Amino acid sequence: MTETVSVDLPGRAYDVVIGQGLLSQAGTRIAPLLRRPRVAIISDETVAALHLDALQAGLNASGITSECLTLAPGEGTKNWQALQTCVEWLLDQRVERGDIVIALGGGVIGDLVGFAAAVLRRGVRFVQIPTSLLAQVDSSVGGKTGINTRHGKNLVGAFHQPSLVLADIDVLATLTPRDFLAGYGEVVKYGLLGDAAFFDWLEQNGPALAAGDAQARVAAVRRSVEMKAEIVVRDETEQGDRALLNLGHTFCHAFEAATGYSDRLLHGEGVAIGCALAFDLSARLGLCAQEDPSRVRAHLRAMGMKTDPTDIDGDLPDAEALLDLMGQDKKVVEGQLRFILARGIGDAFVTADVPRETVLDVLRDALA
Ligand code: GLY
């Protein structure tokens, strides 16, 4: 079963293909984009060891030759130095304006390679082949690319849309359960922000999906990508609605900063906790039913996920310090924190109108 979602940006429309066996079909799917039968691939050592041979065989089957640069895995690679390594290597490979660069990996590789493609020769096309669930449902779609600097995460980058995304569901089999569930945090986010029926479906099908049911995985990735595509087409550069995709992220960023972006807390785990707290905040402000936060937590718990800051190993700063960390988030506008709140499951909205004391109360209760 293969599904295709179109991201209908005028003049830069592209497909996100979701299904099984896509690495072996990479040649036939990428060939129509090529002006000459060669591509440059950038990956990381972990992903390349697992999936590079299959990708190169899939390309070879269509007569496409490829060279690959492999980088060290992990968030530490999303930096200036790795950007330079990528760009210089792509130039060494004589990648031209009309060529295609392939990003094979999770969110780090997708963001870094997308940014390298954006600046190389003032922009070459690239194909995302996301290998984590998080990258398949979020970071590979929508054209946000970039690197981290000493000032913070993703502060340098560009909007550069891919020309094609191949989300091969089979590669998710190599993820650890923890990484898979972290990606699932972003899947749940879509139901919570804009599709109550999808959240109902996840309550029913989440366990099968986590256990490896390929049809359920394709369906969940497809619906997530469809929702992201709709939002990105409405608001590519995040002037308004795209911020809905940050449900749970304001809280998440504070916990990620407090845990030093270490593996004490994976990004998707922080998003899941952040979503639960965003519903706590919404309920406390009388915006959604008092039962909604419990329902969100019940599903996350049923999936074996973290739901509260107390689930994070080790000490955390107090509520005031966490609120300060939220204030350092790059999504702060004119000094005002923006929150994504909800009138109910599937009905989120963006606001800066949240009393500081109420946020502190939510954090204090969550830390208790
Ligand atoms: N990950 C949020 C966005 O793409 O806007």
Image (cartoon, grey):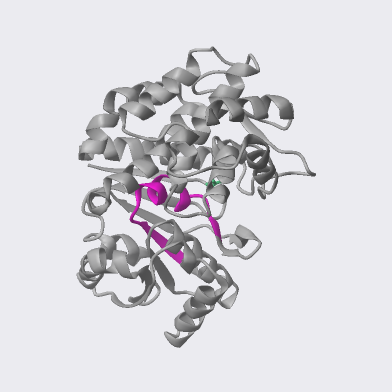
Is residue 348 something that shows in the picture? Answer: no
Quadrant in the picture for residue 219: top left
Is 60 rendered above or below residue 254?
below
Report x, y in % for residue 270: 48, 41
Residue in the foreground of this view, choosing between 368 and 62: 368
Magenta stretch bounds: 126-145
Is 40 rendered above or below residue 355?
below
Report x, y in % for residue 189: 46, 34
Is 36 rendered above or below residue 202?
below
In magenta stretch: residue 293: no
The quarter of the rendered structure image containing the N terminus is: top left
Task: Identify the residue shown where x is 21% and y is 37%.
Answer: 211
Quadrant in the picture for residue 110: bottom left
Is residue 208 something that shows in the picture? Answer: yes
Question: Number of callouts in the render?
Answer: 0
Check the image and name the residue furthest to the right: 334
Is 130 rendered above or below residue 27?
above
Instruction: Answer with left or right where residue 254 lies relative to residue 140.
Output: right
Report x, y in % for residue 80: 57, 73
Task: Identify the residue shown where x is 25% and y is 55%.
Answer: 22
Instruction: Answer with left or right where residue 244 lies relative to residue 101.
Output: right
Task: Identify the residue shown where x is 54% and y is 12%.
Answer: 289
Instruction: Answer with left or right where residue 68 lies relative to residue 323.
Output: left
In magenta stretch: residue 142: yes
Report x, y in % for residue 352: 73, 32
Residue in the foreground of this view, choosing between 353 and 190: 353
